[in-house]
Image (cartoon, rainbow, N blue to C red):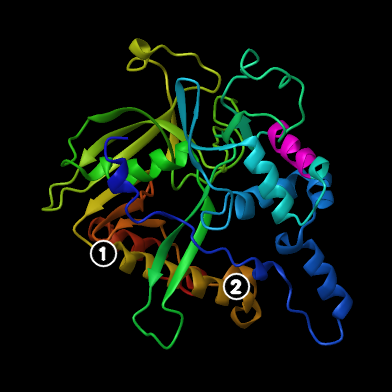
Amino acid sequence: YKNNSDMLADLSVCSESHFAADIVQDAEGNVDETEAAKKRSIASVTAEDLLQSDKRMHEYATRRFFHPRSGIALKTKRRGLRSYTRAFSEYNALLYLMQDLRTSEKSVASAVGARMVEIGIIKQVSTAHLSLLPGDSGKAFGFGHEVYVRSEISPSRVSFRALSIKDKSISPEIDVEFGLDVVDMQSINFWREVLFEKPLVEDSDFGTYAVVHPMAVTSGHNEDGTAEIVSSHGGYIVHRVTVKKVFHSMAKPGILSMSSFPPGAVILPQEQAAAERIEVGPRMIAKTGDNLLNDLSIGLSFRIFSNIWRADEDRFGGPDKVPFSFAYDVLPTGPKAGLLECLPGLTPLNDYDWPKWVADYGTNEEVLNT
């Protein structure tokens, strides 16, 4: 990425993992259930638990084996003429697993390490030097001299400060922890940095990207019958962002259209500009100069009131009489920048034909009372 270091300035590898949070604080009298929860906790997981559940193995790798402070030490390892960064030897992994899983049996720790290789959590990057180390071939995990790294398909977990609260009498901040892959990283960089680097120009685009559409939540199939385009985290992946319109106000906000190549299409780089694409809605408005947290707060208030009214539908005479407030999605991407959902088919309030509405509905009590 062009500005990767800046993009990650407020992203930090989680330095604290409170495994005790996995232990259910149960009500008095439910001692058995609490003990069962403790046994299921990553803090007390055993090698047998890991070998019986790949899901638990992935969780263990994320929260303990690769923990930035208490996990296995990642260093630059040399084998022959090659160097491997953020790597570890299989022997060190064996020793770590024995200590962390509290087992004295090397064969048990070796089985856990071998399973981590099989399901793609770690992978070997060095090659066996049979001429230098005869007998290495065929050895169980941990008994050789090879170098391993974390596999790309096992994304690291990161945390970022999502909200700061000035009132120190309550929790001063909220930390959010989530999985992050390459598409997510590129999406963060694009929607926060690339999009706002220069003023928007009508009918221009940003080239070919692979980023997640932050507001596409519709499931199902496209109009042409093709399957929906999704990422590993469930969002639509778009490959082209086009500026459809730029408003004439001082901030120059613009309407963005997102589109994707058809699923399974093989498109050469020189063919990407003219290749057929499928638009993925909704369109969005990119805006700078305003704190969109205010818009987000108002929209959230509308949604809360709509839910309160819907929960008390009898007060209004039935579900068809319940008032409802429409709200558009808002995504602040910075202190003075962000994205707003563009709703099609709407008429600006100042342009609405109120005399016609009064003529059509002014005497209709059912409409007036809705």
Q: Which mark is residue 291?
A: 1
Residues 293 and 49: in front is: 49
Q: Earlier in the sequence, mark 1 or mark 2?
A: 1
Amino acid type, mark 1: Asn
Residue at 71% x, 59% y is: 42
Residue 55 appears at what percent x and percent y? 73, 47
Q: Which mark is residue 310?
A: 2
Residue at 10% x, 53% y is: 250
Please tell me whether residue 5 is drawn above or below residue 273 in the rendered image. below
Give the quadrant of the N terminus: top left
Residues 146 and 5: in front is: 146
Amino acid type, mark 2: Arg
Q: Report the side of 87 relative to 53 (left or right).
A: left
Q: Report the side of 170 relative to 203 (left or right).
A: right
Q: Report the side of 210 relative to 61 (left or right).
A: left
Element assignment for label 2:
helix
Magenta segment: 109-119
Is 114 in the magenta? yes
Residues 362 and 168: in front is: 168
User: Neighbour class for label 1 at 10 Å: few (<14), some, many (≥20)?
Assistant: some
Front disc: 1 or 2: 1
Is 81 in the magenta? no
Residue 144 appears at what percent x and percent y? 68, 29
Residue 6 appears at what percent x and percent y? 28, 47
User: In which quarter of the view is residue 165 placed?
Assistant: bottom left
Evaluate whether residue 58 shows in this view: no
Q: Which mark is residue 15?
A: none
Residue at 34% x, 81% y is: 166
Please tell me whether residue 273 is drawn above or below residue 143 in the rendered image. above
Residues 252 and 101: in front is: 101
Element assignment for label 1:
loop
